[in-house]
Amino acid sequence: MYYSGLGLDRVVDRRGDSDWIEALLTRASTQVIPLWQDQCLVRNETPLRLPLAQARDILVAAGDRVLLGLEGERAVFAADVSGLERESAVELAGADRMLDVRAMVPTITPDEAGLLAYARGVLHWNRNQRFCGACGGPARSCNGGHLRTCQNCGKLLFPRIEPAVIVLVELPGTPRRCLLGRHAASGPNRFSTLAGFVEIGESFEDTVRREVREEAGVTVGAVTYQGSQGWPFPAGVMIGFRAEALSDAIDVDNVEVVEARWFTAAELRARLADAALGGPYRVDSIGKALIDQWLADTD
């Protein structure tokens, strides 16, 4: 899946060595990925990864620079130039425009998408964690951009991760059917798997049962883990499940979900093949992976 399985060595054990990190910024092999307000700087439809010799002005202008890790012996940094005007950032980087990571899928490889999403997420956190939430003191970047320390009370601030479950609900019997919902913000034919954020004190399985009941009015029994996906937009991780419904009764909440239906495999394949029926689904989403696996299982 996209945004998962990144081959980069994150060098967690060396992030605290500031001298080593500064030394990486003198190596000719080092590369820098510039971003502006969560957007990738792009030239000729290719996201920029600048060699150090071409990135020195970017590093000077950057509000934050983060060590992403090593590719072999090559260090890769991300630099946030959000403090510049949009046109100035494009000109400084030698780009011709900006694009969101998700807009470039699937024209880039899953590994490239994962690296860019990682850069986007960690820069977003640094840009939005300027001050301590406990005392309001200024927070200084440490550990290569993966930790901020309050300069007033000393509190350590780590990147925030927001876990969410995503689930494909199946109704036992023949023919096999699965539940998809249409969210309030979606178009009239856009159905997708159900999802929701984990609350304090909940297990992932508890969240699946609560979200499906709240959004679609469906009670589920068995819940089975399928996989997970990093989703740094800006700070999520999606935990995928399949769940078994105890009845076919549907009662949507009309707040988050305005319509829900049971689909057979044949009906779902028709939707995936016809853009007028709302397909195809996002190729980078774990939701599509859950649907594809369910369709494969029905075969």
Image: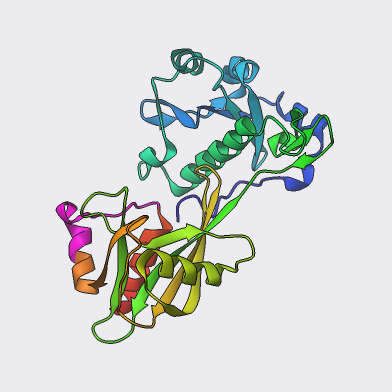
| In magenta segment, residue 273 | yes
Q: Is residue 138 visible?
A: yes
Quarter containing the N terminus: bottom left
Residue under the image location 48 percent in, 69 percent down: 210
Report x, y in % for residue 221.
46, 81
Report x, y in % for residue 129.
66, 34
Report x, y in % for residue 73.
67, 39
| Coloring basis for residues | rainbow
Furthest residue to the right? 153
Q: How many tags in the picture?
A: 0
Report x, y in % for residue 188.
21, 52
Residue under the image location 53 percent in, 15 percent down: 84
Q: Is residue 77 visible?
A: no
In the image, which residues are magenta? 270-284
Quarter containing the C terminus: bottom left
Q: Is residue 75 left or right of residue 151?
A: left
The answer to which quarter of the image holds residue 101 is top left
Q: Is residue 92 left or right of residue 263?
A: right
From what the image shows, is residue 185 above or below residue 289? above
For the residue pair 145 and 216, the one nearer the viewer reads as: 216
Q: Is residue 154 left or right of residue 273?
A: right
Residue under the image location 76 percent in, 27 percent down: 22
From what the image shows, is residue 30 above or below residue 53? below
| In magenta segment, residue 245 | no
For the residue pair 55 and 182, the one nearer the viewer reads as: 182
